[in-house]
Image (tube, grey):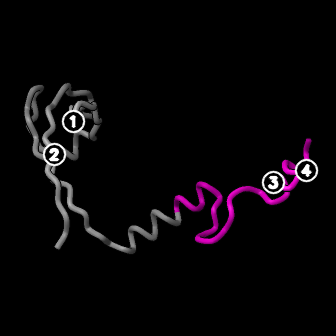
Amino acid sequence: MPQQKVLRAVVERLEKSAVVLEVGGREVTFPRASLPTPLTEGDTLAITITLDGDSAAREEVAASLDSATGKAGPGRKRGNPRTASARTNRK
């Protein structure tokens, strides 16, 4: 069974292509097209977040993070071994 959480958000302001919401004391910007219309400042939204558990999406995100951090997967040490050894030999 998927896990769910419902967040309450208040429309703080409407911008040209975005809506600024206050969620849990923080401002969050959403594309205006992704929210129901019509919206006005002060409206309250209930946002339901469902943990899907899709392993394909999880693997895609992990691969994206690995490429962004230069990490090649589990078990690989971080950093460049050439520069790491040079640092340890310095006094």
Number of other residues with Cα within 10 Å of mark 2, as a class: few under 14, some 14 to 19, many 20 or more: few
85 to 44, vertically: above or below: below
Specify the label residue 84 is tagged with: 3
Q: Amino acid at mark 4?
A: Asn
Whether pointer 3 and pointer 4 mark residues with C-beta atoms closer than 8 Å, the reply is no
Q: Tag 2, which secondary structure?
A: strand
Comparing labels 3 and 4, the label whose residue is closer to the camera: 4
Residue that label 2 marks: 7
Number of other residues with Cα within 10 Å of mark 1, as a class: few under 14, some 14 to 19, many 20 or more: few
89 to 20, vertically: above or below: below
Whether pointer 2 and pointer 1 mark residues with C-beta atoms closer than 8 Å, the reply is yes
- At which x and y percent is residue 2? 19, 69
The magenta segment is 64-91
Comparing labels 4 and 2, the label whose residue is closer to the camera: 4
Task: Find the distance from the CA under tag 3 to the CA under tag 1.
Answer: 43 Å
Q: Amino acid at mark 1?
A: Gly
Q: Earlier in the sequence, mark 3 or mark 4?
A: 3
Whether pointer 1 and pointer 4 mark residues with C-beta atoms closer than 8 Å, the reply is no
Task: Find the distance from the CA under tag 3 to the CA under tag 2.
Answer: 45 Å
Residue that label 1 marks: 24
